[in-house]
Image (tube, grey):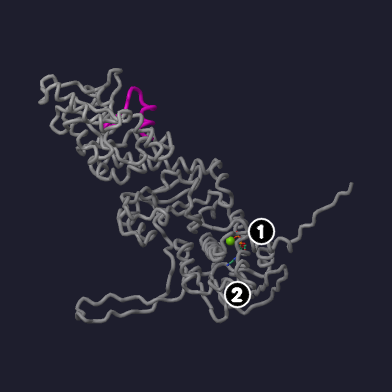
Amino acid sequence: MATGKINVSVENIFPLIKKFLYSDHEIFLRELISNATDATLKLKHLTDIGETDVKYGNPVIEVKVDKEGKKLHVIDQGVGMTKEEVEKYINEVAFSGAEEFLEKYKDSAKDSGIIGHFGLGFYSAFMVANKVEIITKSYKDDQAAHWVCEGTTEFTLGDADKKERGTEIILHINEEDEEFLEENRIQELLVKYNKFMPIPIKFGTKEETLPLPEDAPEDAEAETKTVDNIINNPEPAWTKQPTDLEDKDYKSFYRELYPMQFEDPLFHIHLNVDYPFNLTGILYFPKMTQDMNIQKDKIQLYQNQVYVTDNVEGIVPEFLTMLRGVIDSPDIPLNVSRSYLQADGAVKKISSYITRKVADKLKSLFNNNREDFEQKWNDIKIVIEYGMLSEDKFFEKAQKFALYPTVENEYYTFDELQEKIKDNQTDKDGNLVVLYASNQDEQHSYIEAAKTKGYKVLLLDSPIISHLLQKMESEKEKITFVRVDSDQVDNLIKKDEEKISKLSEEEKEKLKGDFEKVIPKEKYTVQLEAMDSDAAPLLITQPEFMRRMKEMQQTGGGG
Ligand code: ADP
Ligand code: MG
């Protein structure tokens, strides 16, 4: 038997990195700007703690497209690198200078917002470029360095005559990746990934219209001036303290997030926790409209203000994925599969924290302004009912604010409703019978009949309501939900002795017979009692269980 050693060389790894490290080629720009941001934040930190007396100033990161030269430039004014540092940080694949920095400055740098940590981001440049150059001048060195690599393990490292502090990365874009030489495409990427990053990012210039002076004549042409096109808002609302923000600030941030949304959100929830995990963010309850684009306008996930994804499955409980807003957490492991994510302890804690914050907010809205909460109920009930159905903890908390509207527009909590109906809506087994309608027009005569008898009729019309009612019945003792057009309404109908039918017994029997001839008996029951009410001369009912079976089949099992 022979033993041997498998020889792994860097040459083997390089093409793998290029091909498979990131499935999405477009993220190279996010990685380079993250590095430029880190380099700038490092300099800020070093000047803050007095380790250097270079002037920090107002650094920007600049992105430039050179279409003719087929090059893309990313230029920063951060710490830069000495030749030795290029050897160390760039030539050693998978060595993270960001992690090293955080390790070195531990406590003081923990809130510095440094992004990198895998030591692989830089090499994503080779996904779109066949040649990459680094021209860099460290804040602590007079001599700039020039590194060139053509996508192999060979590189050259020499001197450069760059005068200003910082780093310029030059990508020689592959022929098949020339989309990244289109200004529109780069603008789109910058807006998608870097819109809220902490250092200003400049991409070309734009014309800004100056406001007209007060006394300008009607036909005066507004003057424009050329200004830097700054892509990002370096201080997005979620990074601020809730006490520093007003309602209008939250609304305008909503519009920043979803520029195509013209409807205001109903309310927001500011998330802010730093133990046992770090998470900030703002969630919005949108107004549910017919034309709302659930697919497009979703919750966005960030890490240190860098956009990562709008797939928050596993991180945000499913019933809250209809909400909008941002979540920013450096503690969410992202380079792992979704199923792992759902099992991860930290992620589970994040998910239940979010659920709790949403429940708390709903409760306080209900307590502080019930009228307003009632008005919003129809827009938010889908989320709440779905949450009650899918999360037991939320179900419990929702008992304090979940509302049950009646056909007459009264809104009761379940406790209040119970109080209202306990005296005259029970069946022979002593169960409290909650009557409800699912469609006010179709069930109009049944509703009227029940109202005449003095019953409260709820209007419950969400698509998932039958599942929720099933759950309520199993969670609560001696409660049964019965739809107004069900045969079980009989069980609580006490005949009003005073009322005398306008029809004789003989006439009634004949009428009943006539109806039964045309209605399948095995599916419906023809009722005569209700013939005495003004609204309904006659009731045709369907057994409750049959109707529910059918509904469950239609909406699918989700209980
Ligand atoms: P990470 O960012 O995870 O540390 P990268 O592969 O993105 O790993 O970058 C490797 C290292 O190269 C960084 O940690 C940093 O030390 C150095 N570096 C990359 N880009 C720059 C830059 N623009 N300015 C200064 N240093 C940089
Ligand atoms: Mg990086």
Quarter of image, res 420 = top left
In this rendering, the count of numbered labels is 2
Against 450, residue 234 (above or below) is below
- Which quarter of the frame holds ligand 1? bottom right
Q: Which mark is drawn over residue 94?
A: 1
Q: Is residue 360 visible?
A: no
Label 1 amino acid? Ala
Q: Which mark is drawn over residue 175?
A: 2
Q: CA distance from mark 1 to mark 2?
A: 27 Å
Sequence order check, earlier mark of 1 and 2: 1
Q: Secondary structure at mark 2?
A: helix
Question: Please, which residue is most extreme toward the right here?
Answer: 1
Q: Which residues are magenta?
A: 467-485
Against 220, residue 94 (above or below) is above
In percent of the image, x 53 and y 70: which residue is there? 77
In the rendered structure, the answer to whether residue 109 lies left or right of residue 466 reads right
- For disc 1, does the CB lie below 8 Å from ligand 1? yes
Q: Percent from the top left, x then y, of residue 472? A: 36, 30
Q: Percent from the top left, x then y, of residue 431? A: 30, 21
Q: Percent from the top left, x then y, of residue 481? A: 31, 29
Q: Is residue 272 visible?
A: yes
